[in-house]
Image (spheres, helix red, strand yellow):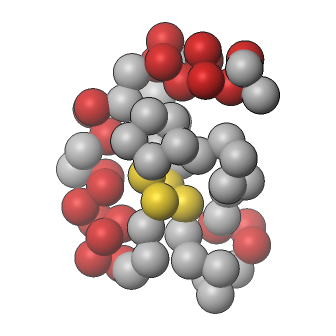
Amino acid sequence: MYLQTPVKLPATWPSSFRFAPEVVCHGVTGFVVNTLEEMMDAIGQVNQIERKRCREYVELL
């Protein structure tokens, strides 16, 4: 099993690459980015996302 962490991309990118903003809480359930450089930085921080916190956050929606 592997962990999938969403990285929210700019609205100008194709919709198939974007996630629902209400699900992505920056630094908690994923990362919100605006540029390719920010996306590459966010990928390097993916290990900071805790699966338990992701689930807790989404269960509150």
In percent of width and height, residue 42 lies at 31, 55
Q: Nearer the viewer, residue 28 or 46?
A: 28
Looking at the image, residue 11 sits to the left or right of residue 52; the answer is right
Can residue 46 be seen here? The reply is yes
Q: Quadrant of residue 34?
A: bottom left
Looking at the image, residue 44 sits to the left or right of residue 2; the answer is left
In percent of width and height, residue 21 lies at 67, 55
Q: Nearer the viewer, residue 3 or 50?
A: 50
In percent of width and height, residue 15 lies at 74, 72
* Most distant residue in the bottom direction: 12
Identify the residue at horizontal 44%, vertical 34% (top origin).
28
Q: Is residue 61 above or below residue 40?
A: above
Q: Is residue 3 above or below residue 20?
A: above
In percent of width and height, residue 31 lies at 43, 52
Can residue 5 be seen here? The reply is no
Q: Is residue 1 above or below residue 19?
A: above
Identify the residue at horizontal 27%, vertical 32% (top origin).
47
**Picture quarter with the C terminus:** top right
Identify the residue at horizontal 45%, vertical 48% (top origin).
26
Number of numbered markers: 0
Identify the residue at horizontal 54%, vertical 24% (top origin).
54
* Most distant residue in the front direction: 60
Q: Quadrant of residue 18?
A: bottom right
